[in-house]
Image: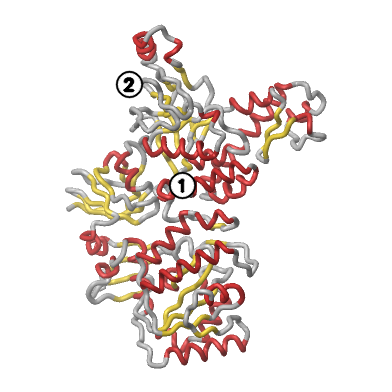
Amino acid sequence: MTRYFEVLRRDGPARLGKLLLERQISTPALITSDDWVSAGSIYRYASLQEAAEAATSLKGQKKLAIAPYVPAALHFEPALRLSPPEIDGPKGLVVHPLSSEKPEDADVYVLASAGVLRNPRDLVKAVVGVRNMTPPDTALYAPALASPANLAFLVYLGIDLLDFTRVVADGYLGRYHTRDGIWNLGDLNELPCRCKHCQRLAENREDRKLLADHNLLKLEEELLIVREMIRSETIREYIERQVRVEPNLTAALRLLDQEHCYLEKRTPQHRRSVFFANTAESLQRVEVTRFAERVLYRYKAPPSDVLLLLPCSARKPYSTARSHRLFAEAVRSWHRHLHELILTSPLALVPRELEEVYPAASYDVPVTGRWDREERAWLQSCLEAYLKRNKYARIVAHLEGELEETVRALGLEAVYTGGGTNREALARLSAAVREACLGAMRLPDLRLQRYRALADYYFGADASNALLAGKVQVRGRELQDEKKRPLAATTPNGTLALSLEGAKRLEPLGRYIVTIGDFLPKGSLLAPGVMDADEQIRPGDEVIVQGERAFGLGRAKMSGWEMAASRRGVAVELRHVKEV
C-alpha cells in the first residue's frame, strides 16, 4: 500500500500507472540513477548498525530511496533478514527473486539479480512470485534486464520499471539491438536502421557510444509501442508475435500461460479491441478458458429436445453473417423448438444466446479449413462436458470438412447434414430439423432465454432464477418486471447493465458485491473506500455496491482482490447510487 504509485489502466498483468518521485513517471518506464538513491549492499558496511544508520540517512528523499539489502545467489535465500528501515519518502526494497519470504511494505520492489534471469522458468517464477506476495498498488523494478526484443514481454509479465543498463553495456560490447533481436555489429553488412546514430555509425563502426545510443533509442521506441498496446487493449496480441524473436521468449510465454490463476486474476472481463487468435498460444489465453468455463459451468441451456450444431462465421456476431442468416431462414418454422450451438476455434462452444458476449462477438482467427490436434482436442473435450450437463433427445449437425470429422470422432449420435450454404445443403438442413423437431417441446420467449443466459454468465450459476423471478417481460433491449419497472438491459457490447431494482434481486446471492463504509459515494468509488469485495470481480464486471448508507451499481475498474488490498486508484465507476 503506497502513497507514491497508482495504477491507472490494466490489460492483464501489464499496467499503465504513475510513480510520484521528484518527477512524475508514467509507467511502464525506463528509470535512471537520477530517479533513485540506494544504501547498497550490507557488505559495504562494517556492521549492521552502520547499515541501519545509512538507511536512516535516506529520510526526506524525494527520489526513490532503496534500503540496504542482503545479496544472495539466485537459488538461495539471503543469509539474514534486516529490520525494515523507517523511510518517510518513496521507499524501495530489494527482494530476492526466488524467495518464499513475504517482503516488508514498500512503494517499489527491486528485483535482485534480475539481469541474470535469462532462464525462462526462473524469470516467470521470480516475477509471478514477487507480484503475488506484494500489494497490487506497488511497482516492480527489474534492473539490467530489458532489451527492445523482450521489453513487451517483461511488461506483460508484470514489471513496471526497467532501465537501459543492458542495452548500453551491450553497445560498448559491439552488440546491435532491435526489436527483432541482437546482432554482432561486425556481422552486419548493412545497418537495418536509419536513425541519426546509425547514419553516423555506418561511417565509423568503431564508435561504441553511437552503438549504445542506437540501442537506447530502440528501447525507448519499443516502450512507446508497448504503452500504446496497453492503451488499445491489444498487448496480448502484440506479445504473441513479439515472442517469436527468441525461443526463450516463446518458452517464457508458454510457462506464463501455465500460471492461469495469476493471469486470470488480472485479466479484464471485456476489451474494446478485437481478439486475434493467430497462434497456438491463443488457445491458452484467459479469455478463451474463462469463456469456456462459464459456458460449461455457469450457463445452462434452455430445456430443448433438439440441439442444432452449426459452424462459426467470419462476421460477428454470427447472426449478422450471410451463412447464419441462411441457416435461420432454413429452420425458421422450427426455431422455437430447437437450441443452437456454434462450434468454433478457439472458443470451442458458443450458445446462440451468448453470441454478443466478449470475446464471442469480437474475435478473429486465421481460416484454413484445417483443425490441428490441439484445436480438435479442445473442442471435443468442451463438447463432451457440455453434453453431460445439457441433455438433448436429438442432435442435428450441419457441419462439413474437418469440423464434421472432429465431432464424428466423438461417436456422437447425430444427423449429419454435410454443412454448406447452397440450395441443396440448406434443403438437407431444413429436412433434418423438421424431422428432429416433430413432437419437440416449444421453447419460451427467445429474448427471455437470452437474459437467462447473460445473468448466469455474468453473475454465476442460477443467477437467472433470481433476476427473472415472477412475471417478467422484455421490451426492446430492456427486461422489466410485472409493474414495468426495468430490471436490466443489454448493452451494444454484449454486457448486462442492471437497474437498482434488478440489483436488489441479485444482492441476496452475495456475488459481485463491493462493500463500502459509512458514506455516500459520488462519481467514482476509490479503493480506500472499499472494505471488502467479491474475489470473482474482474475489471469491466457489473458490480453491486452496498454500504451502511449507500446502495449502488457500477463497472469495476480493478479486480475484487485488488480493491480490497489497494489504497490508491478508482475501484468502481458508479452509474446509480441511492441513499438507504
- Secondary structure of the residue carrying tag 2 is loop
- Residue 168 percent location from the top left of the image: 64, 25
Judging depth in this view, the residue of 6 and 140 nearest the camera is: 140
Q: Please identify the quarter of the rendering in which residue 364 is found.
A: bottom right
Q: Can residue 336 be seen in this view?
A: no
- Secondary structure of the residue carrying tag 1 is loop
x 60%, y 27%: residue: 166
Q: In this view, does 17 lie above or below 308?
A: above
For residue 478, the mark is: none
For residue 12, the mark is: 1
Q: Can residue 386 be seen in this view?
A: yes
x 54%, y 23%: residue: 32
C-alpha span from label 1 to label 2: 31 Å
Judging depth in this view, the residue of 405 and 538 nearest the camera is: 405
- Residue 136 percent location from the top left of the image: 37, 38
x 64%, y 42%: residue: 246
Question: Tag 1: residue type?
Answer: Gly
Q: Alpha-carbon neighbours of circle 1 within 10 Å: few (<14), some, or many (≥20)?
A: many
Question: Tag 2: residue type?
Answer: Pro
Given this view, does label 1 or label 2 mark the residue nearer the observer? 2
The residue that mark 2 highlights is 84
Q: In this view, does 157 lie above or below 42?
A: below
Query: In the rendered view, does 83 fall on the left or right side of 204?
Result: left
Q: Please identify the quarter of the rendering in which residue 70 is found.
A: top left
